[in-house]
């Protein structure tokens, strides 16, 4: 097993709060870089765990002038480590003879405690339910495509999906202060794909502990 494989399987894992303390930043600044600069896991329960090796590399980067050659080199290494860790962890999971029971990430999104934790980080959960059928089957990656479109305009990202009996539930994490903009963008994307008539859009209201169906504001 190479060094990264060993680190991926045996590394000390940090909570978002611990990573933020090491980096000297707010908790909400950690989430947008998960999966891009920091390798993370979501084990059973409702908390992100971040691999320490990535946090330490990022701390070294933040101590340098971001325009310096040394900083740019570290940034490249950070991205490479993160992507390699994602691939390595997938291989480790696949090679286990007795894999641990897998809890779907989408399951956590139905937890009120999880929604409240995200809200404290400045994030809101959006749920897009789409009725299963031929129009959806022809576009197997539509949920991820919408997530990428949101990322391009800094309105959030795709989180996870869950297959229900007659529908697919797709979850997105969006900045709470841009919730209306993100909802409008998701609606427009569904309309452009011809899926709007098959869909409904809701968002979590952690203050009241309920999910609300979204209706576009009348301007």
Image: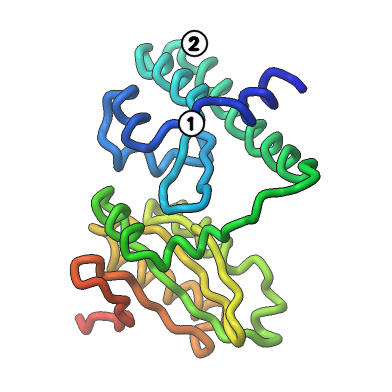
Whole-percent x and y of residue 21? Answer: 29, 26
| Element at label 1 | strand
Number of marks in picture: 2
**Residue drawn at point x = 23 percent, y = 58 percent:** 177
Nearest the viewer among 5 and 187 is: 5
Residue 170 showing in the rendered view: yes
Q: Is residue 102 left or right of residue 48?
A: right
Name the front one of labels 1 and 2.
1
Q: Residues within 10 Å of mark 1 (few under 14, many from 20)?
A: some
| Element at label 2 | helix
Tell me: residue 190, above or below residue 182: below
**Residue drawn at point x = 45 percent, y = 19 percent:** 56
**Residue drawn at point x = 46 percent, y = 14 percent:** 71
Question: Does label 1 or label 2 sit earlier along the sequence?
Answer: 1
Tell me: residue 45, above or below residue 13: below
Residue 67 showing in the rendered view: no
Label disc, if present, on residue 69 of the rendered structure: 2
> Mark 1 sits on what residue?
13
Q: Is residue 185 left or right of residue 162?
A: left
Nearest the viewer among 184 and 80 is: 80
Label disc, if present, on residue 191 of the rendered structure: none
**Residue drawn at point x = 37 percent, y = 12 percent:** 64
Return the residue found at the far bottom. Answer: 197
Whole-percent x and y of residue 170? Answer: 51, 70
Q: Are the residues flagged by discs 1 and 2 in contact, CB closer than 8 Å?
A: no
Residue 187: name its quadrant.
bottom left
Nearest the viewer among 46 and 146 is: 46
Tell me: residue 213, above or below residue 52: below
Whole-percent x and y of residue 217? Answer: 23, 80
Nearest the viewer among 20 and 1 is: 1
Which quadrant of the rendered structure holds the C terminus? bottom left
């Amino acid at each position: 097993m190479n060094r990264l494989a060993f680190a991926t399987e045996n590394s000390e894992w940090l909570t978002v709060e611990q990573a933020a303390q090491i980096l000297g930043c707010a908790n909400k600044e950690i989430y947008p870089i998960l999966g891009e600069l920091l390798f993370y896991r979501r084990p059973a329960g409702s908390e992100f765990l971040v691999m320490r090796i990535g946090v330490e590399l990022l701390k070294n980067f933040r101590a340098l002038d971001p325009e310096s050659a040394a900083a740019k080199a570290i940034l490249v290494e950070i991205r490479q480590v993160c992507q390699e860790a994602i691939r390595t962890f997938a291989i480790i999971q696949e090679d286990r003879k007795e894999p641990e029971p897998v809890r779907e990430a989408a399951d956590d999104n139905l937890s009120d405690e999880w929604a409240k934790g995200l809200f404290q980080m400045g994030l809101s959960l959006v749920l897009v339910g789409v009725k299963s059928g031929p129009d959806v089957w022809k576009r197997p990656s539509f949920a991820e495509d919408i997530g990428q479109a949101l990322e391009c305009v800094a309105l959030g990202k795709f989180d996870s999906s869950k297959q229900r009996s007659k529908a697919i539930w797709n979850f997105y994490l969006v900045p709470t202060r841009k919730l209306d903009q993100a909802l409008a963008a998701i609606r427009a994307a569904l309309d452009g794909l011809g899926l709007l008539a098959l869909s409904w859009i809701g968002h979590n209201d952690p203050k009241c502990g309920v999910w609300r169906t979204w209706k576009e504001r009348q301007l």
